[in-house]
Image (cartoon, grey):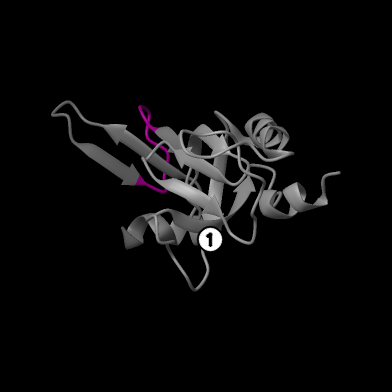
Amino acid sequence: MLALLVPVIAGAEVYRWTDVHGRSHFSDRHHEDAQVMHIDPGISYYRVEKVFDGDTILLDDGRKVRLLGINTPEIAGRIKSAEAGGEQAKQWLRLKLEQRKVFLQGDVEKQDKYQRTLAYVFNENKQLINVELVKRD
């Protein structure tokens, strides 16, 4: 793994190819059957599968994520009534994130009492969605 990181740190390309025996090979030098690998160290992107409400999303890895520092009005549920602005917050978040990629930045507290991951959520343009939601009218 360290061999893969050295070219990335140096800004060189990493090539990958498979030999006739099905074994994968990696190099910083081009090979005739090689494809350039795209490596983005340090950031893992996840696709947002679903938006539950204005402050909770579901990622493609199965995690429910609660936006840190955000508490939007509730939407109607089995045992709760809708609060004014809840559906608008949900729709805004859906337009911003659903079926799009995000990356997370955690804080000291990793999960809430419902076992949801607590995080600051960034879109692919590196916009902090938690802040964008607060700034909206």
Magenta stretch: helix, strand or loop mostly: loop
Give the left or right position of residue 26, taking residue 108 as reference.
Answer: left
Q: Quadrant of the C terminus?
A: top right
Give the left or right position of residue 66, taking residue 113 as reference.
Answer: right
Mark 1 falls on what kind of element? helix
x 21%, y 30%: residue: 19
Q: Which residue is mark 1?
A: 10
Q: Residues within 10 Å of mark 1 (few under 14, many from 20)?
A: few
**Residue 117, how many percent across, how many down?**
44, 55
Q: Quadrant of the N terminus?
A: bottom left
Residue 122 showing in the rendered view:
yes
**Residue 82, how many percent across, how many down?**
63, 36
Highlighted magenta segment, given as a residue range:
27-34
Looking at the picture, tell me which residue is in the foreground, 30 or 98.
98
Q: How many marks?
A: 1
Reply yes or no: does residue 132 show up in magenta: no
Q: Amino acid at mark 1?
A: Ala
The picture quadrant where one finds residue 31 is top left
**Residue 28, how many percent across, how many down?**
42, 48
Looking at the picture, tell me which residue is in the foreground, 77 or 69.
77
